[in-house]
Amino acid sequence: MPLVRLSILKGRSAAQKRALYRRIAANLHGSTGLRPEDVFVSLVEVGREDWSFGNGIASYAQEAGKTAPVPL
């Protein structure tokens, strides 16, 4: 059984998550033939400070007195 694991920013509602689960299962069924009941999805919610988009920089975390850069 496939497991889809996504890291997402905190803040999505339960309804948004349910819609995402359904869409993932439906898309995998449509593109691969997998049965929707065989698709497992795990969301890992993280804060903005938990992301780095390279160079060892906490892309969204603010240092004291500085504005956090916005990644492209």
Image: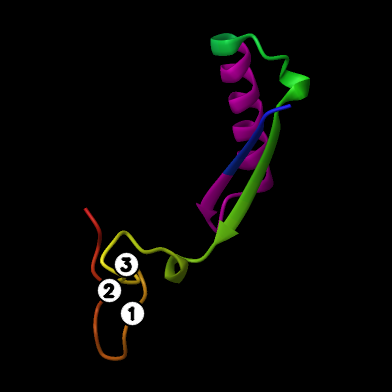
Question: Where's residue 67, x and y in %?
Answer: 24, 78
Mark 3 or 2, closer to the camera:
3
Q: Earlier in the sequence, mark 3 or mark 2?
A: 3
Amino acid type of the residue that numbered disc 2 sits on in the rendered structure: Ala
Outermost residue, right side: 37
- Residue 68: which numbered mark, if any? 2
The image shows residue 33, relative to residue 53, as above or below, that is above
What residue is shown at x 56% (from left), y 18% (from top)?
Answer: 27
Q: Nearer the viewer, mark 1 or mark 3?
A: 3
Rendering coords of residue 56 (x, y %): 31, 70
Left/right placement of residue 38 relative to residue 71 reads right
Q: Which mark is residue 62?
A: 1
Tag 2 secondary structure: loop
Tag 2: Cα neighbours inside 10 Å, few (<14), some, or many (≥20)? some
- Image location (x, y in percent) of residue 13: 63, 49
Q: Amino acid at mark 1?
A: Gln
Mark 1–mark 2 Cα distance, whole angstroms, equals: 5 Å
Q: Please report the bounds of the magenta region as a residue range.
A: 6-29
Q: Earlier in the sequence, mark 1 or mark 2?
A: 1
Prevalent SS, magenta region: helix
